[in-house]
Amino acid sequence: MNFNIVLLGPPGCGKGTQAKMLTAKYQIPQISTGDILREAVKNKTPMGIKAKAFMDSGKLVTDDVVVGIIQDRLKEPDCESGFILDGFPRTVVQAEALDRTLEEAGKKIEHAISIEVDDAELMGRLTGRRTCRSCGAMYHVMFNAPQKEGICDACGGELYQRDDDQEATIRNRLEVYQQQTAPVIGYYRKKNILRPIKGTGGIEDILKSIEDVLQRKE
Ligand code: AMP
């Protein structure tokens, strides 16, 4: 099936986890601006060097940088039969730029899935989050611990706590979300493609809710 999807929701709502599962199921790529930026930081590219300070403090990287990333990535052939945007758009300016880019290619976003979780729950999820340095798999010290502490079950890589998963930075990220990203939800609501999903409960239950939305005929 051919889907052009945006996954919305605050940091820690489970966008990345759901995007990975949807990718496996529908064979369409997950495009995460956060992953692309972290890779650029790791490789110390000019873009990575510029982005690092914003990311470490929980602020948003400038719209022109992330819009450029997405425009390049959407031209890749694997996006032809659909894609899942994870962590983009995060401002209304980005959402508008995305629509213009897609329109030029004769495409559009069909579903903006918004995963809803409250702030208290997000804080617990994010402070306990651990990420694999090699493959990007995510764990949680309490809810989804790896078999061996500090080691990725999937690839044996080292697990680490992202700099921006420290408590003070998380507060910033949640505030930035409320101020700059929450309006994107209204943007898609007006277009009648907003699909709110409850983001609490088991990972499989949430996936099922998303699949129900994707199968529904509008
Ligand atoms: P994420 O992994 O999606 O939580 O992203 C980590 C960090 O990368 C964010 O806190 C921002 O600093 C930056 N970032 C990722 N996506 C975007 C975006 N669409 N717009 C601006 N900054 C972004």
Image (cartoon, helix red, strand yellow):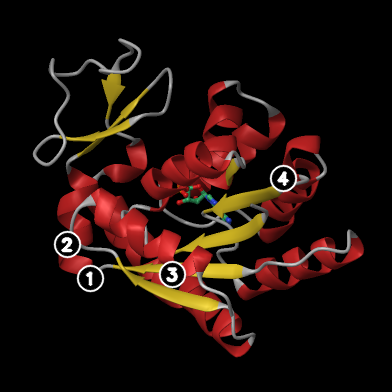
The residue lying furthest to the top in this view is: 156
Three-letter amino acid code at the position of disc 1: Asp
Residue occupying the point 76% across, 69% down? 99
Residue in the image at 22% along x and 68% along y: 119
Farthest residue, direction bottom: 190
* Distance between the alpha carbons at the discs numbered 2 and 1: 6 Å
Front one among 9 and 30: 30
Q: Is residue 216 above or below residue 165?
A: below
Asked if one can make out residue 207 in the rendered structure from this viewpoint, the answer is yes
Among numbered discs 2 and 3, the one appearing first in the sequence: 3
Mark pair 2, 4: CA separation: 31 Å
User: Identity of the amino acid at label 4?
Assistant: Ile
Quadrant containing the C terminus is: bottom right
How far apart are the alpha carbons under marks 3 and 1? 13 Å
Q: Circles 3 and 1: CB distance less than 8 Å?
A: no
User: Which callout, 4 or 1, points at the residue further toward the start of the chain?
Assistant: 4
Give the amino acid at mark 3: Ser
Asked if disc 2 and disc 1 are in contact, CB closer than 8 Å, the reply is yes
Going 80% across and 36% down the picture, which residue do you hit?
A: 77
Q: Residues within 10 Å of mark 1 (few under 14, many from 20)?
A: few
Q: Which residue is mark 4?
A: 69
Percent coordinates x, y for residue 94 in the rendering: 67, 66
Q: Which residue is mark 2?
A: 121
Q: Residue 76: x percent and y percent?
A: 79, 37
Q: Total of numbered circles in the picture?
A: 4
